[in-house]
């Protein structure tokens, strides 16, 4: 492929990822405002706990979505799987935007909210594997780390977009208006964006790796081949994703709540700090991908996990007691730059572990399982520890999981040297 054609494919494959993650993170970004609409009883921490529980429920749908869409991506193609995932996310966002609150329809409101998050969880479970596989297969051998890092660029971009919409609405609307109806606007925006991206992705080119698999014909059950022939690779993806997911949701999604609920910053200031730190994190991804192509994936992975484990307690403690938003921002940026060693390598390392005929499922399923167990429960565990008066126990938990992921990264073979992506 020419550089232009490769860039066009990477951009097209990344757009759906951006919209998917915008829709997914909108829930977390606006939970401070819509929590009372669905859960009117209790104090703010209790309301946030209930919305965090539904956030976690959406994660438990992701392994199911990863399995369904992973098999679909390995059978029907990466491009078709990307388009299907975006369509499902559009549906979930539209339902949340239109669902009346508890005061109007009672207990049906949180039930519908949960159902919508389940649909979004199924969608996102399929999106990660399909996009990681598509980008890695389209990237080319020489710059595979650099190009594949754009999966996390768009992932973080989706979160920044959600926070940007929040900051704009905070400036245009009063807190009362945001709580009453303003929180519905970002979900409606997400549904409209998903329709646009769906149209774009139906026109993407399929990867050479999948075309080769299709030409070879069916080789039996994708799931059976993955579990019986590649259990070690599945275990590696699960272990790396455990530390990566937990730390990501700790220092990005939960950070906004932590800044407001623990550090004592206003909701608006907390949103601004989170958005600024995410911009720094986004810009660091291509640098991490470039370094991975030159220094190797294993060194960056191990360094991110082990240094992150050592810094989690001091960084979280310092942010909790910070009175300056600039200090809180600097601390958040520092830990996110460290974790770039994982996030920039996330897509390419997992894709390189598997042969093309099971790559979509192999990347998606163990990653989604780890996300359900560690990423999706991060905010709930953090808030539960805070409610019990043992907030520092959460810092220890994050550090231990990061350390275990670091040990696995040290023990694995260099993915770049053992890559199973045959096509350039």
Image: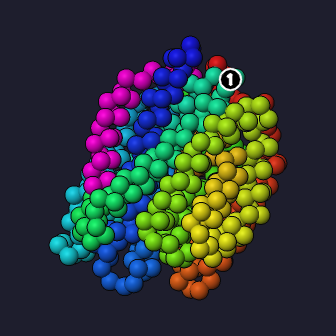
* Secondary-structure class at tag 1: loop
Q: Quadrant of the N terminus?
A: top right
Up/down of 315 relative to 289, above or below: below
Q: So how many labels did they put on this image?
A: 1
Residue 300 on image: x %, y %: 75, 44
x 59%, y 63%: residue:
326
Q: Quadrant of residue 27?
A: bottom left
Residue 132 belongs to magenta span: no
User: Is residue 115 visible to us here?
Assistant: no
Q: Magenta-highlighted stretch: main secondary structure?
A: helix
x 70%, y 23%: residue:
142
Residue 16 on image: x %, y %: 42, 37
Relative placement, left or right, of 340 versus 72 is right
Up/down of 398 relative to 85, above or below: below
Name the residue nearer the viewer: 66 or 82: 82
Stretch in magenta? 185-212
Q: Quadrant of residue 333?
A: bottom right
Label 1 neighbourhood size at 10 Å, few (<14), some (14-19), many (20+)? some
Relative placement, left or right, of 364 versus 307 is left
Name the residue nearer the viewer: 119 or 357: 119
x 37%, y 23%: residue:
203
Q: Which residue is farthest top? A: 2
Residue 296 on image: x %, y %: 78, 36
Residue 123 on image: x %, y %: 41, 47
Q: Which residue is farthest left? A: 104
Q: Which residue is mark 1?
A: 141
x 80%, y 40%: residue:
413
Q: Quadrant of the C terminus?
A: top right
């Amino acid at each position: 492929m020419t550089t232009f054609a490769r860039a066009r494919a990477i951009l097209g494959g990344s757009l759906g990822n951006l919209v998917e993650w915008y829709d997914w993170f909108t829930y977390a970004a606006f939970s401070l405002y819509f929590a009372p609409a669905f859960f009117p009883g209790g104090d703010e921490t209790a309301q946030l706990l209930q919305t965090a529980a539904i956030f976690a429920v959406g994660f438990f749908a992701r392994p199911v979505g990863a399995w369904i869409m992973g098999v679909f991506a390995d059978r029907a193609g990466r491009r078709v799987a990307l388009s299907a995932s975006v369509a499902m996310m559009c549906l979930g966002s539209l339902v949340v935007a239109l669902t009346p609150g508890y005061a109007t329809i009672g207990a049906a409101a949180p039930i519908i909210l949960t159902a919508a998050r389940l649909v979004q969880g199924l969608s996102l479970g399929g999106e990660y594997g399909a996009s990681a596989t598509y980008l890695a297969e389209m990237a080319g051998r020489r710059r595979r780390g650099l190009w594949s890092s754009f999966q996390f660029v768009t992932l973080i971009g989706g979160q920044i977009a959600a926070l940007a919409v929040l900051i704009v609405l905070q400036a245009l609307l009063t807190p009362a208006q945001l709580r009453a109806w303003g929180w519905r606007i970002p979900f409606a925006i997400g549904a409209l964006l998903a329709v646009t991206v769906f149209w774009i992705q139906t026109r993407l080119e399929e990867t050479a790796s999948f075309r080769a698999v299709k030409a070879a014909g069916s080789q039996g059950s994708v799931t059976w081949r993955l579990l019986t022939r590649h259990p070690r690779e599945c275990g590696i993806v699960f272990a790396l994703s455990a530390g990566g997911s937990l730390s990501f949701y700790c220092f990005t999604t939960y950070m906004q709540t932590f800044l407001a609920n623990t550090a004592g910053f206003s909701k608006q200031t907390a949103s601004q700090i989170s958005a600024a730190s995410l911009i720094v994190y986004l810009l660091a991804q291509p640098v991490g991908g470039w370094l991975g192509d030159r220094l190797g994936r294993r060194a960056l992975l191990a360094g991110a996990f082990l240094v992150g484990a050592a810094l989690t307690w001091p960084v979280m403690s310092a942010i909790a007691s910070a009175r300056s938003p600039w200090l809180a921002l600097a601390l958040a940026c520092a830990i996110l730059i460290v974790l770039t060693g994982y996030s920039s390598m996330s897509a390419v390392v997992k894709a390189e572990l598997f042969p093309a005929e099971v790559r979509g499922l192999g990347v998606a399923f163990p990653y989604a399982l780890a996300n359900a167990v560690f990423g999706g429960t991060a905010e709930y565990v953090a808030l539960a520890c805070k409610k019990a008066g043992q907030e520092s126990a959460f810092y220890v938990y994050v550090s231990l999981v990061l350390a275990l992921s670091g040990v696995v990264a040290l023990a694995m073979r260099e993915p770049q040297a053992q890559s199973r992506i045959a096509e350039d």
